[in-house]
Image: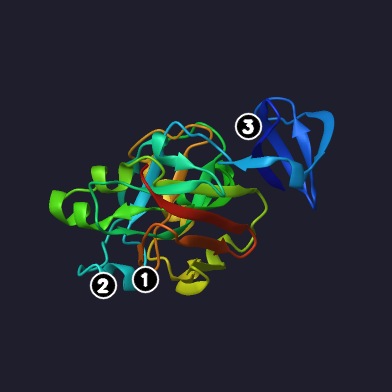
Amino acid sequence: MRLARFSHQETVGYAVVEADQVKVLDGHPMGEMHYTGAVLPLAEVRLLAPIIPSKIICIGKNYREHALEMGTEPPTEPLFFFKPTTSIIGPDDIIRIPTQSENVQHESELAIVISRLCKDVPVERAADVILGYTCANDVTARDLQHKDGQWARSKGFDTFCPLGPWIETELATAQNAKIECRLNGIVTQQASTAEMIHSINEIVSWVSHHITLLPGDVILTGSPAGISQMVAGDTVEVEIAGIGVLRNKVANYE
């Protein structure tokens, strides 16, 4: 099932995407879902970021080759940090290059969406608290990351967390899915989620043993190698097999 958040005319809501249509939901998709009976053509709605969570947790350096290209050894334990919810944008929204940075880069990632309140989740039960998965781009001002010595500013600017195009709730291949990033049509990142150092279940369990997770919370699972600079005029696409394509254009702040 593909759960989407959309706008149509003056309405913002949630829906299930089926082929070229969206079946509108009554209220929020967490818990038991009910349909309104309204069906809209997919081409006539604007897809938004599929969820606005209470928090965005990001796992750093979770692919060996990415850790090495950053000049560090892979961490022995999951390394996590946060992005603010104000950084979220949806498919086809514009990533804005802040005036403070001269080197903004993309990081394509699989994102986990949590289904219910949970704490101290055992690894073997992690799947029980996962609603589904979506595509993410952990946009980073790389020069500021190096300058600051920590990651809050460099990864927290407005528009620095594209999510979408929807939440896929039935991704059986989540731990062995092809992930690819294209910059202006040229492949810059290509890997499989099977290459993660820490698995999806391990990540969910680890994070939940440190902080309480709430319904709708998003966990970014790390970027493969191949991070590349983006500039105004570029188009960046994150594609994950079984989910779809998250596409965003890049522009300067006006």
Q: Is residue 112 visible?
A: yes
Residue 10 lies, in percent from the top left, at: 68, 25
Q: Decide: marks 3, 2 in contact (CB < 8 A)?
A: no
The tag earlier along the polypeptide, 2 or 1, is 2
> Is 117 situated above or below 177?
above
* 45 sits to left or right of 68: right
Q: Decide: marks 2, 1 in contact (CB < 8 A)?
A: yes
* Element on which disc 3 rests: loop
User: In the depicted view, which residue is nearer to us: 115 or 94?
Assistant: 94
* Element on which disc 1 rests: loop
Amino acid type at circle 3 is: Met
Q: Is residue 122 visible?
A: no
The tag earlier along the polypeptide, 1 or 3, is 3
* 151 sits to left or right of 230: left
Residue under circle 1? 225
Residue 204 lies, in percent from the top left, at: 44, 48
CA gap, disc 1 to disc 3?
34 Å
* Element on which disc 2 rests: helix
Numbered tag placed on residue 205 in the rendering? none
Give the residue displayed 48% in from the left and 47% down from the top: 94
Label 2: few (<14), some or many (≥20) within 10 Å?
few
Residue 7 lies, in percent from the top left, at: 66, 34
Residue under circle 2? 68
Give the residue displayed 65% in from the left and 62% down from the top: 242
Amino acid type at circle 2 is: Leu
CA gap, disc 2 to disc 1?
8 Å
Numbered tag placed on residue 30 in the rendering? 3
* 7 sits to left or right of 162: right
